[in-house]
Image (spheres, grey):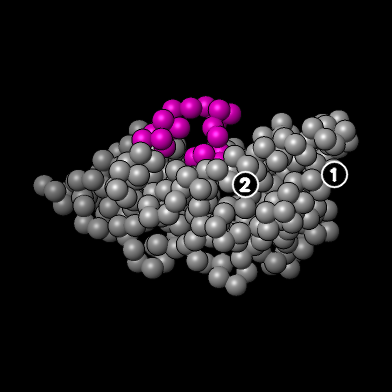
Amino acid sequence: MASTSQDEARAALDAAGQLPDGELDIGAVALQYARIDAPEADWQVAERQLTAIARRAVELASSDPKADAGDTARRRQLLATLLHQELGLAGDDETYDDLANANLIRVLERRRGLPVAIGVIWLHAAEAAGWGAHGVNAPGHFLLALEHPRGQVIVDVFGGGVQLQAPELRSLIKRTEGEHAELRPGMLAPMTKRDVLLRLQNNIKLRRLRANDLEGALACTQDMLRLSPRHAALWREAGMIEHRLERIGAALQSLDKALEIEPTGEAATRIRGLVEELRNRLN
């Protein structure tokens, strides 16, 4: 039964991998990843919760003229009320590294999660309301931006949906990169939906690597590639894990794929050296 659910989820990821980014349903894709990582969980309950969140977001959007007219401050307030007060979502400071914090089903069950997992739910609700929003790839801490022609509003979803102004953003950067760090161009670059979903799964992959669970980390990387099959860095990572597992043939296939997608640059040069070494081992 569990394998059937995982097979269905992986087929859904394969299909999502063929879609342009704008057509991805970020909540639905995150749910498929959660099904794979927690096959015993009741994913249909989580699916109904996502539907209820979307409906409530539509209700709030349609009943608030200021939000409907484009007031991003009001939109932030409504989404924070919905997700953090009504739903009870909160960042998990106590068991931050628990794998459940990156699994959408478990996050909806526990009402606790990592910044990027909570961000997925924010993006799901904002899209349902018809409001522009995107992830922000800030160093060490996922943030979210509500879009507006006159400037975006940066939101700390892990901190309850509070708005971050320049002083708070500067403090966040300093905590992550050191006292001499400052805000710089590109630091708050927007993320695509794929970027957000891959960052969510990357949390699982890294925790498995730290636990020396190479099989689990490889499976996670391969599932990330279902969503982003032209991601050279992921093919390199898959090849390196396969190399550590002494699966030389599989490693060569993955590394060759990475070189096909990204044939130039420092990473490609390093990979060519490893590919040559592995081919010599096969001879």
Q: Magenta stretch: dominant SS?
A: helix
Check disc 2: other Cα within 10 Å, few if <14, some if 14-19, many if 20+.
many
Tell me what residue is drawn at x 72 percent, y 53 percent: 86
- Mark carried by residue 121: 2
User: Can residue 93 be seen at all in this image of the molecule?
Assistant: yes
Q: Can you give x and y, in whole percent of width and height, for residue 82 in the image?
A: 73, 49
Q: Amino acid at mark 1?
A: Ala
Q: Nearer the viewer, residue 16 or 138?
A: 16
Tell me what residue is drawn at x 34 percent, y 57 percent: 216
Does residue 128 show up magenta in the picture?
A: no
Tell me what residue is drawn at x 39 percent, y 41 percent: 9
Q: Amino acid at mark 2?
A: Ile
User: Can residue 271 be seen at all in this image of the molecule?
Assistant: no
Element on which disc 1 rests: helix
Q: Nearer the viewer, residue 188 or 207?
A: 207
Element on which disc 2 rests: helix
Q: Can you give x and y, in whole percent of width and height, for residue 94 in the image?
A: 60, 72
Residue 243 figure quarter: bottom left
Q: Can you give x and y, in whole percent of width and height, for residue 276 in the image?
A: 24, 46
Q: Which residues are magenta?
A: 11-30
What residue occupies the far right of the structure in this picture?
A: 66
Q: Say how many tags the image has.
A: 2
Tell me what residue is drawn at x 46 percent, y 48 percent: 43
